Image (cartoon, rainbow, N blue to C red):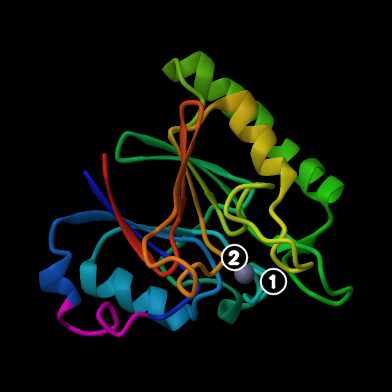
């Protein structure tokens, strides 16, 4: 099964009718945040496949009453779990707080508290399916992995905790731009988990 994950930057190659030919065999779209929602809506309608996403720190605060705050036809899985095409997914949107008035930004402890919402559904997955989680979809990287030392790009410790306890096969994140320093997409193996920086897009085959 092929998954197209996207993050942070609109790619002209994808934002064209050619995407239907290039990615004709992709079965699931995953958005890791900080992308215009029109771009996500374009991709899900042209490829005609499900889209799951989490908001980034440059995205609007999700509201059920405000259509512009969400992707039409997509599933926002921030603080949610989802079983789709046989895969167990969970989402954790947002980034470290670096502006007092920023939306989708959280302190380290605040994010650990938010992530508690995932604990019971993930334990239930483990009981029911024998594993808790295949893909953890985040905007921020984990602390110390693909992150940076500046206030806006420090990774979130809550993600490391989920990795430690629930051992997902993959963590897919955005938020940190590596293209200036490293042309290859960073992959880091942490125990059974492969952490992938999706920026700006990445094809995953499972
Ligand atoms: Zn970001």
Label 2 near ligand 1 (CB < 8 Å): no
Is label 2 in contact with label 1 (beta carbons under 8 Å)? yes
Q: Is residue 46 above or below residue 23?
A: below
Tell me the residue at 43%/33% (across/down): 169
Label 1 near ligand 1 (CB < 8 Å): no
Is the residue marked by circle 1 packed among few (<14), some (14-19), or many (20+) residues within 10 Å?
some
Specify the quadrant that holds the N terminus: top left
Determine which quarter of the picture holds residue 24. bottom left
Q: Position of residue 54 (x, y in %)?
A: 55, 59
Give the dominant element type of the magenta stretch: helix, strand or loop. Answer: loop
Name the quadrant where ligand 1 sits.
Answer: bottom right
Q: Is residue 80 above or below residue 75?
A: above
Residue that label 2 marks: 55
Tell me the residue at 72%/66% (across/down): 104
Reply yes or no: does residue 62 show up in magenta. Answer: no
| Foreground pick, 94 / 65 | 94
Tell me the residue at 51%/25% (across/down): 132
| Foreground pick, 73 / 187 | 187
Tell me the residue at 41%/70% (across/down): 200
Q: Position of residue 187 (x, y in %)?
A: 43, 48
Q: Is residue 190 above or below residue 197?
A: above
Q: Residue furthest left?
A: 21
Residue 116 tag number: none
Bounds of the magenta span? 11-18
| Foreground pick, 42 / 25 | 25
Residue that label 1 marks: 61
Sequence order check, earlier mark of 2 and 1? 2
């Amino acid at each position: 099964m092929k998954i197209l994950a996207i993050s942070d930057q609109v790619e002209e190659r994808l934002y064209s009718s050619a995407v239907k030919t290039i990615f004709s065999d992709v079965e699931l779209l995953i958005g890791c945040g900080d992308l215009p929602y029109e771009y996500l809506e374009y991709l899900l309608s042209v490829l005609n496949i499900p889209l799951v996403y989490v908001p980034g720190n440059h995205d609007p605060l999700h509201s059920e009453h405000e259509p512009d705050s969400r992707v039409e036809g997509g599933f926002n899985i921030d603080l949610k779990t989802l079983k789709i095409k046989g895969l167990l997914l969970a989402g954790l949107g947002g980034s470290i707080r670096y502006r007092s008035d920023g939306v989708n930004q959280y302190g380290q402890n605040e994010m650990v508290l938010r992530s508690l919402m995932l604990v019971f559904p993930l334990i239930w997955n483990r009981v029911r399916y024998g594993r808790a989680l295949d893909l953890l979809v985040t905007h921020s990287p984990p602390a110390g992995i693909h992150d940076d030392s500046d206030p806006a790009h420090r990774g979130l410790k809550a993600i490391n905790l989920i990795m430690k306890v629930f051992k997902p096969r993959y963590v897919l994140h955005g938020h940190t731009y590596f293209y200036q320093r490293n042309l290859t997409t960073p992959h880091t193996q942490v125990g059974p988990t492969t952490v992938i920086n999706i920026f700006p897009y990445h094809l995953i085959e499972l």
